[in-house]
Image (spheres, grey):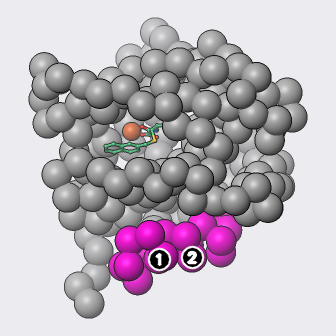
Amino acid sequence: MRLLPGHLDLAAQRALRDRIHALLAEAPLYRPTMPGGDKTMSVRMSNCGPLGWLTDRAGYRYADRHPETGRPWPAIPDALIALRDTVTGLPYRPEACLINRYDAGSRLGLHVDQDEGDFSAPVVSVSLGDQALFRVGGATRKHPTRSLRLSSGDVVVLEGESRLWFHGVDRIYPGTSTLLEGGGRLNLTLRRVTTAPSG
Ligand code: MD3
Ligand code: FE
């Protein structure tokens, strides 16, 4: 796992924030339901790209449409495609960008991202807005964990073994950024979903 602190400067963070806000007007944030349908998540979500990750009572999966509007997800902004190329050195396009929106009390339990068909492709994460206490462990739930604060503009690259490590977000630190109106945090994760073409 590679942490690139402050990879995006303030101008880049503002430009990306504005792109994401425009995109969320097309594909509104929704509150996902956990498999089984008994619980909802405290993180709201949306996606851009040909595919988007979602969860509802039927389970976790990738789908080509927004679960509430029924419309295809909007395109991934060029700046995010370029960022991914820069930080991974790999040319193939990400297929999904999951947008997580955290409010002051939101958290994300320890989990592994394993709904993709290709674990060899890195996942790239971009943080915007309030700081988050991020926790990362190892290949099993029992593995000791480390905690680190992610700040606005930080980029994390999950590659190699770390691609399948347990991770989650324990808490948000309200009032630590003025980037987002009303506070809170956005996290964007760029993902390859189907098998990457060789070369
Ligand atoms: C480590 N998002 O969307 S981003 C997720 O801050 C997710 O919203 C968190 O976990 C967030 O699935 C963490 C950093 C991250 C993303 C994917 C990973 C860390 C990861 C995949 C493997 C290991
Ligand atoms: Fe994850």
**Of the residues shown, which amino acid type is indicated by label 1?**
Asp
Q: Is residue 58 left or right of residue 16?
A: left
Q: Which mark is residue 85?
A: 1
Residue 194: x and y, percent?
32, 65
The local secondary structure at tag 2 comes to helix
Along the viewing direction, whichever of 31 and 158 lies nearer the viewer:
158
User: Is residue 16 visible to the viewer in this orientation of the structure?
Assistant: no
Q: Does the segment drawn in magenta span residue 129?
A: no
| Badge 2 vs badge 1, beta-carbon distance below 8 Å | yes
Q: Which residues are magenta?
A: 74-93
Find disc 2 in the rendering and name its residue: 82
Q: Tell me the CA gap for discs 2 and 1.
A: 5 Å
Instruction: Judge whether 159 appears above or below 79 on screen.
Output: above
Q: Residue at x 73, y 63 (%)?
A: 12
Quadrant position of ligand 1: top left
Q: Dot 2, crowdedness within 10 Å: few (<14), some or many (≥20)?
A: few
Residue 95: x and y, percent?
46, 66
Q: Residue furthest right?
A: 181
Q: Is residue 42 left or right of residue 124?
A: right
Of the 4 image quadrants, the one containing the C terminus is bottom left
**Of the residues shown, which amino acid type is indicated by label 2?**
Ala
